[in-house]
Image: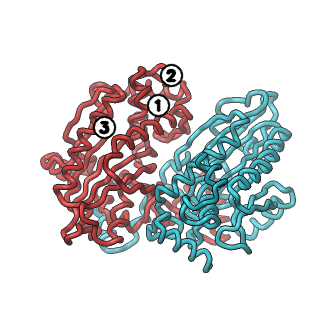
Chain colours: A red, B cyan
Amino acid sequence: MDMQTSLLDRLFDAGLLIDTGVDGLYGRSSAFEDVIQRFEGLISAFGSSSPSEVIRFPPGMNRSHFEGSGYMKSFPQLAGTVHSFCGCELDHVNLLQCMAEGNDWTKDQKATDIVLTPAACYPLYPTIAKRGPLPAGGGLFDLQSYCFRHEPSKDPARMQLFRMREYVRMGTPEEVMAFRQQWMERGQELIAAVQLPVEIDVANDPFFGRAGKMLANNQRDQALKFELLIPVTSTAKKTACLSFNYHQDHFGKTWGLTTSDGAVAHTACVGFGLERIALALFAHHGLDTADWPAPVRKALWG
Amino acid sequence: MDMQTSLLDRLFDAGLLIDTGVDGLYGRSSAFEDVIQRFEGLISAFGSSSPSEVIRFPPGMNRSHFEGSGYMKSFPQLAGTVHSFCGCELDHVNLLQCMAEGNDWTKDQKATDIVLTPAACYPLYPTIAKRGPLPAGGGLFDLQSYCFRHEPSKDPARMQLFRMREYVRMGTPEEVMAFRQQWMERGQELIAAVQLPVEIDVANDPFFGRAGKMLANNQRDQALKFELLIPVTSTAKKTACLSFNYHQDHFGKTWGLTTSDGAVAHTACVGFGLERIALALFAHHGLDTADWPAPVRKALWG
């Protein structure tokens, strides 16, 4: 915990992150944003050999798509639903009275049709399924959005609102497995290009509750998830900065997504935790990007 | 309504916007994003003669700051609070049962400490106030974030999640009025540079309810808000694409923000509705950016 608080305080002091009074919710300086933007450029360069469709969704998604995804089965504690005031003028008077008295005014807010995006790829699957069967050779998509996870923490590498860049592959099991293998190699080259220490390991998602333990074990046993780990706030407990996920036919079945010959499509994604990677760069190379090693500067700024 | 639906359908058909099944919530293509990015570059070029501090907040803000801002007094119907599941394993079982039965599972979600950002500058005022008095000459800030407003609509120029770029000036009344005047001129030059028809008018915010009518009238009478209007989906009802707002000492008083000599700071902002400007460009110059007039292409792509 000490190293986490210490890095966070150093980032606040340097003005790279800006305290908002809520753990895991920070403003970013232009220097911080520049690192994110440059690293995204590097991702694009590594990804450019395979043509992809670029889509940028806003940070919220259709609630009915979210409900259909099964996210609330696995990670109910992390999701964020968006609620609004839907009352009349009298309700508004009561609301203001409630706020003035310091009472809980949020209990009468009603859920809207929007849920915060939990991972950049969640809005994609129903969108692509609606187009009909995938073309021969499947599909490859390039996504990025702010994502929300309700896990307040003093660990700067565990933000509540953070950006995730993703490539998503849809197609036959062979196509998506080849994609994942390719990105597991590319991801390590990419991180080596910015001189960060890295190791790759099989992983599991933070499924909720005791029943979730079984899901996690199953995910590990089948090696469905790998993570690229970089020490950020601790050398003992490294931070997952990239993840490589094979969903098998989960999203294909859920959304009726099929390959060109009518089989249920398989999907896989590689996700980059952009803030985590920026934090790793600042933690390893120093808080002033002008002092970063020349090869790292060259990789990012060219 | 016909022209609105027709533009939206044309944007969907061209793949520039992507339907998510919720009115006002759309995916963006790479061509759409490129226009936004290039237009932001043009804003930066116009703004670069006055040095500003760049801050990028995520699309959510501290709920206590939001509560303190008075937003729920004026626009309760537009705000979006973020809620999460905070229950135990038994609650989770009940939640899943409720979802499986197609009942309203959202009523037990609890408000988190985060509210969606209603305008890019809302998180700024308490952040700057915490630093102490402004330096001599005041402050100038450059912001951009996704903002949320709960107003589902088929008008593509009225999205629920959209990006706002802002410059915010804090200082003496003279300093902030000079800033607003400067941007009212710059804004018109900027829009002229991309060959869009434009007019400027005094305006008011959509204050809630009958009591809000008085606030709106007061705002107009005092000429606190101007808007730069461009026809997008209708020539009769033009769309506000830039707004110029003088807050007087509202945020200064609210957050204890003071000038270097201890007076309550005044504030003003210029806000660019980035999606609205992109829509205006597509509506006027056509859906293929390659066909846009050469001077417009030069202004945006250099």
Which residue bears the numbered disc 3? A240
As drawn, the label of residue B19 is none
Q: Distance between the residues labelled 3 and 2?
A: 26 Å
- Label 1: how many residues lie within 10 Å, few (<14), some (14-19) or many (20+)? some
Q: Say if A109 sits above or below B234 in the image.
A: above
- Count of all numbered marks drawn on residues in the image: 3
Are the numbered discs 2 and 1 placed on the same chain, yes or no?
yes
User: Does the rendering let one see residue A94?
Assistant: yes
Report the residue at 47% width, 34% height from top: A35
User: Does the rendering let one see residue B91?
Assistant: no
Which residue bears the numbered disc 2? A290
- Going from N to C along the chain, the mark reached first, 3 or 2, is 3
Q: Which chain carries label 3?
A: A
Report the residue at 26% width, 40% height from top: A227
Image location (x, y in percent) of residue B176: 80, 41
Image location (x, y in percent) of residue B259: 78, 32
Q: Which of the pair A209/B140 is nearer the observer? A: B140
Quadrant into which the C terminus of chain A falls: top left
CB within 8 Å, label 3 to label 2: no
Task: Indicate the secondary structure of the residue bearing disc 1.
Answer: helix
Q: Which residue lies furthest to the front in this view?
A: B294
Q: Distance between the residues labelled 3 and 1?
A: 24 Å
Image location (x, y in percent) of residue B171: 78, 36
Q: What residue type is labelled 1?
A: Trp
Report the residue at 52% width, 58% height from top: B32
Q: Which chain carries label 2?
A: A
Which residue bears the numbered disc 1? A301
